[in-house]
Amino acid sequence: MTTATRTTHHKPPMDHLRKTALAAGLLYLATFIFSIPAAFGFYKGILDDPTAFILGAGSTSGVLWGGFFEIITALTGIGTAVVLYPVIKRWGQTGALAFVASRTLEAAMIFVGVLSVLSVVTLRHDLAGTDASGLATTAHSLVALKNWTFLLGPGFMSAINAVCLGTVLYRSRLVPRIIPTLGLIGAPLLMISSIATLFGLHDQVSPTASVLAAPIFFWELSLGIWMTVKGFKATDSTDEATPVETPAPALSGAAA
């Protein structure tokens, strides 16, 4: 006599996947909304002329808002990885874990950059009227640190993110393959651009750097929009699995 045990592999229902895709898409779009003002607006004065900023007068609220927006950017970046991990790990746990790690490292770089510019604000408030040349030197050092964190964080790590997530999404077909393909094409281009900047071949903000970074920009933007509007495409691994019957060992001495 034999018995059977029923083993069911639980998969998330499609309504749960839709909510996950929506959350991830909104978090991706939030990284754009909050990163652009800090990079091109609020920080402009301190990054263009650290000496004039730390020795000058006027409000520092712009830099403070820029720091606040970058903090949100870092947190939403981690959020994209945390929200996507339970879904994408089914097609590649190594890639999913690598994506969480790379997003976390990118956020850490952003936080270091925020700390550097906020330190300049503190020096401006607390040490105004003291050693002007010393303050100017310190401000330039902290701004240099900020620039390097921008290169290695939102710059280089964005390429690593694209490799990790793009590979899993291409394999899973959760989104149209053209979207992760764009990321996988853009990743080596952005790496090349970052390395070129590292060795002084072109400026971090330059026409060449912008062209090489464009595919990654559109990969992340299109992914965020697609997940928000369309969600994930149904695949075999997102459907409920059929229960599998497993024969149990026969009891010794049981009658045939």
Image (cartoon, rainbow, N blue to C red):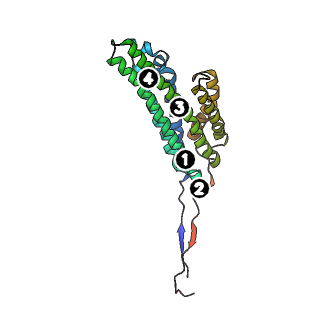
User: Which of disc 3 and disc 1 is earlier in sequence?
Assistant: 1
Q: Nearer the viewer, mark 4 or mark 1?
A: 4
User: Which of disc 4 and disc 2 is earlier in sequence?
Assistant: 4
Q: Which label is found at residue 152?
A: 3
Where residue 76 appears, as percent x and y from the top left, is: 48, 36
- What is the quadrant of residue 55 in the picture? top left
Query: Can residue 58 be seen?
Result: no
Report which residue position mark 4 lands on.
142
User: Which of disc 3 and disc 2 is earlier in sequence?
Assistant: 3
User: Left or right: 253 with respect to 133?
Assistant: right
Measured in 3D between alpha carbons, the distance from the residue under mark 1 to the one under mark 3, in whole angstroms, is: 21 Å
Callout 3: few (<14), some (14-19), or many (20+) C-alpha neighbours within 10 Å? some
Quadrant in which the N terminus is drawn = bottom right
Measured in 3D between alpha carbons, the distance from the residue under mark 2 to the one under mark 3, in whole angstroms, is: 39 Å
Where residue 243 appears, as percent x and y from the top left, is: 57, 65
Q: Residue at x 54, y 56 (%)?
A: 11
Residues at marks 1 and 2 touching, judged by CB atoms closer than 8 Å? no
Report which residue position mark 2 lands on.
239
- Depth check, front residue: 53 or 1: 53
For badge 4, the amino acid type reads Leu
Instruction: Count up the numbered dots.
Output: 4
For badge 2, the amino acid type reads Asp
Where residue 193 appears, as percent x and y from the top left, is: 62, 29
For badge 1, the amino acid type reads Ala
Q: Nearer the viewer, mark 2 or mark 4?
A: 4
